[in-house]
Amino acid sequence: MSTPTSHYQPPLQDIAFIHRHWLAAEADWQRMPAHEAMDQETADMVVEAAGRFCADVLAPLNGGADLQGCSLEQGRVRTPDGFPAAYAAFVEAGWPALACVPEAGGQGLPQLLDAALHEMLASANHGWTMYPGILHGAYACLHAHGDEHLRTTYLPHIVSGRWLATMCLTEPQAGSDLGLLRTQARPAGDGSYRIDGSKIFISGGDQDMSENIVHLVLARLPDAPAGTRGLSLFLAPRGIPRDGTLVPNGIHCDGIEKKMGIKGSATCAMRFEDAQAWLVGQPHQGLAAMFVMMNSARLHVGLQGVGHAEMAWQLARAYAAERRQMRVQPRPADAQGPADPIALQPAMRRILLDLRVWSEGMRAIASWVAHQLDLSEHAPDAQERSRAHALASLLTPVVKSFFTERGFALASDALQVFGGYGYVHEYRIEQTLRDARIAMIYEGTNQIQALDLLQRKVCASGGSALAPLLQVLRDEADACAAAGLEAQFAAPLRAWGDRLQALTQELCAGAQADAELAPRCAEDYLRLTGTLCMAFAWARAVRVSQGLEDASLREAKTASAHYFFSHGLLDAEHWQRRIQASAVVALPGAL
Amino acid sequence: MSTPTSHYQPPLQDIAFIHRHWLAAEADWQRMPAHEAMDQETADMVVEAAGRFCADVLAPLNGGADLQGCSLEQGRVRTPDGFPAAYAAFVEAGWPALACVPEAGGQGLPQLLDAALHEMLASANHGWTMYPGILHGAYACLHAHGDEHLRTTYLPHIVSGRWLATMCLTEPQAGSDLGLLRTQARPAGDGSYRIDGSKIFISGGDQDMSENIVHLVLARLPDAPAGTRGLSLFLAPRGIPRDGTLVPNGIHCDGIEKKMGIKGSATCAMRFEDAQAWLVGQPHQGLAAMFVMMNSARLHVGLQGVGHAEMAWQLARAYAAERRQMRVQPRPADAQGPADPIALQPAMRRILLDLRVWSEGMRAIASWVAHQLDLSEHAPDAQERSRAHALASLLTPVVKSFFTERGFALASDALQVFGGYGYVHEYRIEQTLRDARIAMIYEGTNQIQALDLLQRKVCASGGSALAPLLQVLRDEADACAAAGLEAQFAAPLRAWGDRLQALTQELCAGAQADAELAPRCAEDYLRLTGTLCMAFAWARAVRVSQGLEDASLREAKTASAHYFFSHGLLDAEHWQRRIQASAVVALPGAL
């Protein structure tokens, strides 16, 4: 076997299918004043240019960065070869500003296009993507909560990408539990503050890619109450802009982690010593200001799951087509040599089909959620904005958790296609698997997301938070029925909507008497919701593809949809049974 | 958080429970002439000493070896610091000879004890374990197929472990398909042969731990037919013993792989150039001779899955007990400080319970299969030997595949307990996850094992190969019923035996008309079989633990059994539905 090239091919055809047919996004854009100048052709051009950047600039650096990793030399992080130059090109091309508003110097393009960009970035080079990963969140946070000084001094550099940003939450004793944070802030008397404390797991806490680093730091003011209600958000720059220069601040990188994957990303232990900082938003309201960043960050993490699934699918497909082992029965007409491509083996076809069905279905759903974010901000009708916001809020934890869990599992399935080659560096799938694993942890572990969905959103609303999704499932079932797809798609989709509703009502009722019921059922409930979103994705895909001129695309979408409804939807049965078992059987105490 | 110690605790209590109560092995030993001197106390002492070696000598080297890896210096492999000394201690203590027959210089102990040793080796240091990993297989192969010269010259050194062995199968173009092997052997005229060819993925192909290396090599004689029927097995030593010295042979290590895990193990690309070799067994019968090694190797790989699950369980349990995040409701009586141990959170309790239930259940089944190997060789009654052989043959692919798949999945579940710490080196669970992944691939991929089970064993026998397992499930159901465990354990176990039988009959019938039916269904069929083995394990565990004096052990086993039957057994439903769907719906062709 020759070693494969590092070539990543942006999935432009499928993205265009989703934008054009599955979402019909152009019609929505034209209804939104902020996007009325946007058309599908422009969107295609943006996505194509983003894909070219990912494939030509980032993907070739991915394998080498994994071997080289980052180093800490005299207190400064050195990123892998090529990373700084690639970032300069990213800034030069204006990608950081893609979805920032024009008033702040951005391009004002829909979040839907930003979503396509972020999926492709993760496929091409997840480690590199960590550096600009929080840029849009930092922009959104400062745009919403920064005062005049912060918006004037920092926002333009963040929008342009010339200064990178970090999110400094975690401390050694405080991971999922931000209430335990200890970092202190005290007023300096001049309107600024001084910060002391240690933060860990800070992605890009130091690097050699941008001329300055803007840290957004959660800390406690002297009079702060205990717990999360005593947290305030501060901006602490690595270099303090003064008289045209950057004055060094009391911020130090004490170490970088040895990690399982995303080795190109420097995960830093940071020390703030009398570091000058400025309050973002109101005192003790830091969590609210920070959550502006977290929500867009969570969608991006879900898109990483999609990107890893896509990369795994591309790698496995190419290998399976080339690698010859065993004969298949009956032999293909063009059979030659003593063995056939393993892509013809049933076990490999199953894995490849799973990869295609899941990567395309997850892409549709993640794009749809990004599109809801655009609608929630810019739709002309208040009710439509509110409905879009409700859908995005409900589904963000699903996209974050379910898609990252699937991205990891699919990368492992794809690795199996390679046999022994899957376990060695050159074939790159083992890197995809290692890189994919972090997405199940950061930005709130998948367990935390599941509690967010079932306990804080669905059960806390008495089940009504689920209503917009149920409506979507029913509307799609009706549309499928009207398109002649009753038996195979509309009927099961409608039935599953009813089952989800009934199950949710049972859980909401049960949770009132049993405080542990929702935590016991939360993960499988999230998986059930995610599986039904996939069913929605494929029902709509088969419906809208009926009118396509491209016969091969139409046939592929139809085959995928049938496979998902005959096999993938069996998972929903499984999650439902598990939820029902967990609802009635208590778990033993601590083991 | 303080960094955890590298302490591995051998699961002596559970191993003793399995040997003493679950298997009641002593009574069987006393019926077998080869083991009649064996008693449970001696067995406990052997296992305890093996566990001490694993915990004290091997476990402390595991994390460092992962960081250091192997290097190739002037054509020779250098293994990680401490590996050669640990191997010298292993040889000194006589562990290589554990299950070899006394006539060959071995200790003649049951394979059941060898199984316990191999599970613990994998937990403590999978990378190191790769070097002696094939010793027992090489012994079995030479003992069965070697001629006088080979048995005299090589066997004693292999039994003592002073010389290590490798299994040289794979070539770049031939992984799962051994029929494609190209390495050539030609007669040298003096009774020996000369070998030319390249082999890859050779574990321990070179190392600095033993004074000689004995390669067992598949190659083709000049007149050999194409395909696997033209393969012969040869022994090619690195140093040819002559007049008291070792004369260098034409065997070279050209490179070592950069791998995802088991980095302490040197995975070598080997070149044989006019290498002197001796035929093992008959010409063109190499595969049969090699399969003597493969079967014991496959059980060992399954035990690696058990060992990884055990290690993951130990790591997660210790971390969850110490790490404090969030409050639980209601708060525990001994609550202190602002947060409670995460071991009290329902999501974490679920993961910990899964880890306990699966690691203990898989250990019982793997031990049972090892015990069947002892019975198949040494039981006094021919029918009992034949039944034991049939069970071991049927279940070896299940133990190899299902337990390695579960070992990997459980390591990933355990990693999630650690949050961000799970992704960094010091907490060691990420190494367990990476190391565990190889076991799904080598010694025949899990897909190949699934075909072996359903196609080559079950369907080829018209379903009768399954009969001994069905009998075991029914016998256990009857025993549970007699012990007052009818409703919760006997009834579902009996019902599942019937369902498995009916499903198998359908598949055997369907496979006659549809050549792809078995390959489509094989993986889920293997998972269903594995899940029902777990049900058997827990039904027997709850039954035999009823009489235990140790109340905490009895209660733990009872709680685990109830959890498996209320939750774990739901998986069986899922596998059955998937098999039924796959049986009727064809897959699309190559994608």
Image (spheres, coloured by chain):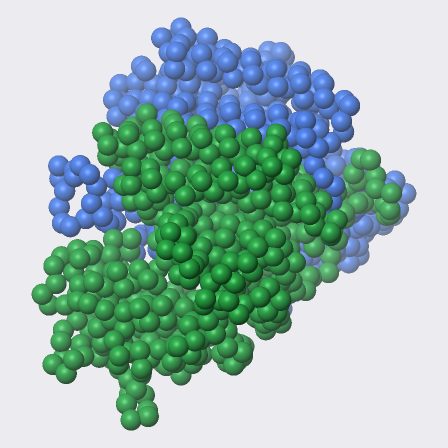
Chain colours: A blue, B green
Q: Nearer the viewer, residue B96 or A346?
A: B96
Q: Give the left or right position of residue A421, taking residue B303 as reference.
A: left
Q: Is residue B310 above or below residue B352?
A: below
Q: Give the left or right position of residue B49, taking residue B344 as reference.
A: left
Count of numbered labels shown in the rendering: 0
Q: Is residue A266 above or below residue A231?
A: below
Image x and y of residue A582, in percent: 64, 30
Q: Give the left or right position of residue B373, taking residue A437 as reference.
A: left
Q: Is residue B433 above or below residue B191?
A: above
Q: Residue at x 88, y 40 (%)?
A: A225
Q: Nearer the viewer, residue A572 or B393?
A: B393
Image x and y of residue B319, in percent: 69, 53
Location of the N terminus of chain B by quadrant is: bottom right
Image x and y of residue B250, in percent: 24, 80
Q: Residue at x 50, y 40 (%)?
A: B475
Q: Residue at x 18, y 79 (%)?
A: B192
Q: Residue furthest right?
A: A223
Answer with the quarter of the image where residue B578 lies.
Answer: top left
Image x and y of residue B442, in percent: 38, 56
Answer with the quarter of the image where residue B347 lies.
Answer: top right
Q: Residue at x 50, y 30 (%)?
A: B495
Q: Nearer the viewer, residue A587 or A545?
A: A587
Q: Is residue B534 visible in the rendered structure shown here?
A: yes
Q: Nearer the viewer, residue B208 or B287?
A: B287
Answer with the quarter of the image where residue A211 lies.
Answer: bottom right
